[in-house]
Structure formats: structure tokens, C-alpha cells
Image (cartoon, rainbow, N blue to C red):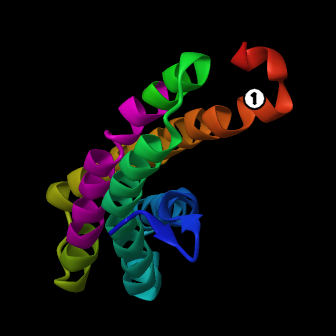
Amino acid sequence: MFDTILGLPVHALVVHVVVVLVPLAAIGIIAMAVHPPWRERFGWAVLLIATAGLVAVPVATASGKNLKNRLNASGPVARMIAAHQHIAQLVLWPTLAMWVLGVLLVWMHRRGQTGVAVTAVALLSVVASLTAAGTVVVAGHRGSKAVWACTISSSACR
């Protein structure tokens, strides 16, 4: 199912959704955590972006496995793909935590809650957002190295 669309690997298409939307949602959730009035104004838009990013993560992971099986890589490229896959498998969990805490932050704001509980959720949402964005950046960097290392630097594939 998550193999190709019009002859292009699904992974190459959907991974860009993750790479753009998860860090964008992280910035939005951090902004809402730091500046409470933005929870009312931007809450639903940020949660929509976070939801789309979260939904794209398992699609990217499944399509990445299919692409790996198609490539039949060996040597240094296979090691780079394995390093990418190792980190990419972790992306779901901080992204899910970021989403849950973002939803909770907006929900608590809408209910008019204030105090220590809201501050704790805001702080945890910042940590989860930084972790989600950081994991996406590291996984994306390792994935692009696996794709482009042999093209840009032919010595990497010897």
C-alpha cells in the first residue's frame, strides 16, 4: 500500500510532510506554551498542523520500509539507511507526546484553567516539541545523507 504513487516512492513524497509539519507544529506549540493568549487565537490551526504531521509519521515509516526493501542497498549505504531507520522509528513517540500535550494545553485554556497544572503541561509540551522536532531533524539528516552521499561524494560509497 505504501510503496509507489505514479512510479515515485511514497516515502520520498510523504517524508516531506513530516519534515515540514512536525517542526512547524513544534514551533506553534512552543509559542502557545510561552504566550497563553495565542492558545485561543492559533490553537486549532496549530493542532490541525500537528495532527497532519502525526498522521504522516507512520505512513513515512511504513513507506520507508518498503523503499528499503526495493533498494537492496549494501555496504556504506546500507549502514546509512540502517542509522536513518533506527532514529526514524523513534519519531512517532515524541510527536505523539507533543500532540497530546498540545491538545491538553488548548483544552485547559478553553476551560479557563490556570495555575501549576497548566504551567506543567506547558513546560512538558515545550520539552516534547523540542524532542519531536530534534528527532525529525536527525532522522531527516541521516536519510538525506543515505540518499545523496553517493551522488555528492563518490568516495562515500566505496
Residue at x-position 32% and y-position 69%: 1
User: Which residue is tagged 1?
Assistant: 150
Q: Quadrant of the C terminus?
A: top right
Q: Nearer the viewer, residue 69 or 140?
A: 69
In the displayed structure, 84 sits above or below 22; it is above
- Quarter of the view holding residue 60: bottom left
Residue 4, image x, y percentages = 48, 67
In the displayed structure, 98 sits above or below 81; it is below
Tell me, yes or no, whether the highlighted magenta stretch contains residue 93.
yes
Residue 49, image x, y percentages = 44, 75
- Looking at the magenta stretch, what is its main secondary structure? helix
Tell me, yes or no, whether the highlighted magenta stretch contains residue 88.
yes
In the displayed structure, 63 sits above or below 69; it is below
131 horizontally vs 144: left or right: left
Task: Tell me if residue 2 can be seen.
Answer: yes
Please state the extent of the stretch shown in magenta in the rendering.
83-104
Residue 140, image x, y percentages = 56, 43
- Quarter of the view holding residue 40: bottom left
Residue at x-position 40% and y-position 57%: 63
Q: Secondary structure at mark 1?
A: helix
In the displayed structure, 101 sits above or below 55; it is above
Residue at x-position 36% and y-position 51%: 61
Q: Nearer the viewer, residue 49 or 121?
A: 49
Residue at x-position 58% and y-position 70%: 7
